Image (cartoon, grey):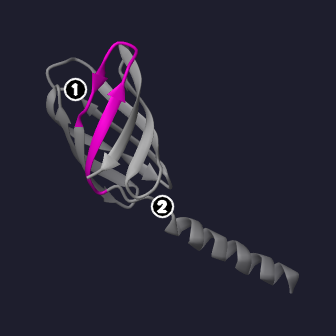
């Protein structure tokens, strides 16, 4: 009887936690900060389950974005137009309209970001 109740409680917790998975579909305005510069690109994301696609628009032009969203963790990359580098972003979704984390332009520059959904 106790095992059955524990299994039911565990199953309920899994369902509730799955309900907290972030959906970041939409347009986001980012604020980037490095030790030497600031930036403010925008991203348009489309999420399908854990798969993330989208478009970067900013200082380097436009680029196709791909990545994942797992729970409240987001990670995505894109090849920076007009450069030889690849951007890598990794962060946490802090509710339906904000996220924060770190980014890196491969091998050259690292920084932090905050973002709000438009």
Q: Secondary structure at mark 1?
A: loop
Q: Position of residue 90 (x, y in %)?
A: 44, 37
Q: Quadrant of residue 32?
A: top left
Q: What residue appears at the point 30 percent right and 38 percent down from the top-left corner?
A: 30
Judge from the rendering whether residue 92 lies leftward or rightward of residue 23; answer left or right.
Answer: right
The spot of residue 37 in percent (x, y) is 31, 17
Residue ID at (35%, 42%)? 115
Q: Position of residue 3 (x, y in %)?
A: 83, 79
The numbered disc on residue 99 is none
Which residue is nearer to you in this view: 38 or 77? 38
Q: Quadrant of residue 31?
A: top left
Query: What are the residue bounds of the magenta stretch?
Result: 25-41
Q: Residue at x 51, y 69 (%)?
A: 19
Label 1, on which residue?
Answer: 80
Q: Which quadrant is the N terminus positioned in?
A: bottom right
Q: Secondary structure at mark 2?
A: loop
| CA distance separating discs 1 and 2 | 29 Å
Horizontal arrangement in the rendering, residue 12 relative to residue 36 (left or right): right
* Structural crowding at the residue carrying mark 1, measured as other residues with C-alpha within 10 Å and reported as few (<14), some (14–19) or many (≥20): many
Q: Earlier in the sequence, mark 1 or mark 2?
A: 2
Seen in the picture, residue 6 relative to 34 is either above or below; the reply is below
Relative vertical location of residue 8 with respect to residue 56 in this rendering, above or below: below
Q: Residues within 10 Å of mark 2 (few under 14, many from 20)?
A: some
The residue lying at 17 percent from left, 26 percent from top is 59
Residue 33 colored in magenta in the image: yes
Left or right of 93? Residue 57 is: left
Residue lying at the far bottom in this picture: please name it: 1
Which numbered marker is on residue 21? 2
- Residue 20 appears at what percent x and percent y? 51, 64
């Amino acid at each position: 009887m106790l095992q059955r109740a524990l299994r039911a409680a565990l199953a309920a917790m899994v369902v509730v936690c799955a309900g907290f998975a972030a959906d970041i579909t939409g347009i986001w305005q980012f604020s980037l900060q490095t030790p030497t510069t600031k930036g403010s690109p925008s991203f348009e994301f489309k999420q399908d389950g854990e798969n993330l696609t989208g478009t970067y628009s900013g200082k380097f032009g436009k680029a196709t974005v791909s990545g994942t969203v797992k729970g409240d963790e987001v990670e995505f990359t894109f090849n920076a137009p007009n450069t030889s580098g690849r951007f890598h972003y990794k962060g946490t979704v802090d509710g339906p309209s904000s996220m924060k984390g770190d980014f890196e332009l491969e091998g050259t520059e690292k920084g932090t970001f905050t973002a709000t959904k438009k």
